[in-house]
Amino acid sequence: MDTVVKPASLVSTAGSNSLYAVYILWLRQIKRYFRSRSRIIGSLGQPILFLVALGFGLSSVFSSSGNGNYIQFLAPGIVAMSILFTAIFSGIEIIWDRQFGFLKETLVAPVSRFNIMFGRTLGGATVAIFQGILVLVISMAIGFRPDIADILPGLVFMALIALVFTALGTAIASTLEDMQGFQLIMNFVVMPVFFLSGALFPLDTAPPVLKWIAAFNPLAYGVDGLRSAFIHHSLYGAFTDGLVLALIALVFMALGAWFFSRIRA
């Protein structure tokens, strides 16, 4: 049973302080994450598999082609992947809360639906950042070596990626009522976004058609931004990466707010 936050407490405080309502909904997401050790451990399986199997398996091929250390190249992409998966699938909690009645009681609170959506999205993005940090630490344990001074700008790009895809997950989940449909749609969206982002291969040597597709892929700018921060290699430039991600985050937040405002719990 979810006992992290009571709808009654949200109602009693939200009317006088909307920021407090955002904080409560953010805190609920954080507590749910840290209370589920199986969720934390299970979500690390795929990133570790990619880091070990691809990082070491293709290292000699990558270095022999003159591209350097593959672990150094791959790790930012896998960090972005872990954030992508955690962020976008956080939207399923909206469907879960709708089925168990929590969402209905939240929506009747005297607080704007934008604040409710923003609190949930901020919480989901924070969880995704935590997950990205865990994968970053694991990457460093197996050979990834960013400079300490590069961690802070890397965290900025991690936060932007998390906001973009948490907002997207919220927007999509707000239009659906069953978890199976959400999972199918997310798998249809997530895998092309990941594989066509340049996370596993360098875009600067990719065929023109892949470069063209990547230019419309938000995650490509996130991966490129992380590489710019951590290994000082960038295709688009750190400023462009940050600007594009920030603009997309605003667009997706607006879409998420609009779709969330139309929910009939």
Image (tube, rainbow, N blue to C red):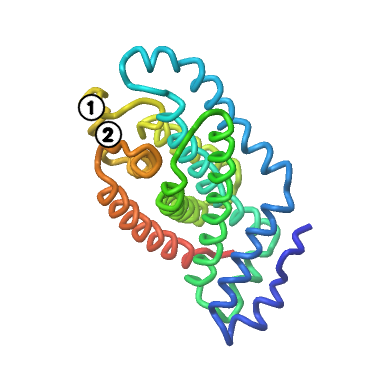
Does 126 sit left or right of 167 as displayed?
Answer: right
Q: What's the residue type where badge 1 is placed? A: Val
Element type where label 1 sits in the image? helix
Residue closest to the far right: 1
Quadrant location of residue 249? bottom left
Quarter placement of the N terminus = bottom right
Marks 1,2: beta carbons within 8 A? yes
Quarter placement of the C terminus = bottom right
Element type where label 2 sits in the image? helix
Q: Residue at x 34, y 52 (%)?
A: 245
Q: Residue at x 58, y 50 (%)?
A: 130
Question: With respect to residue 191, does 29 lie above or below?
Answer: below
Q: Residue at x 23, y 33 (%)?
A: 212
Circle 2 residue: 213
Q: What's the residue type where badge 2 is placed? A: Ile
Q: Residue at x 69, y 63 (%)?
A: 101
Q: Which mark is residue 209?
A: 1
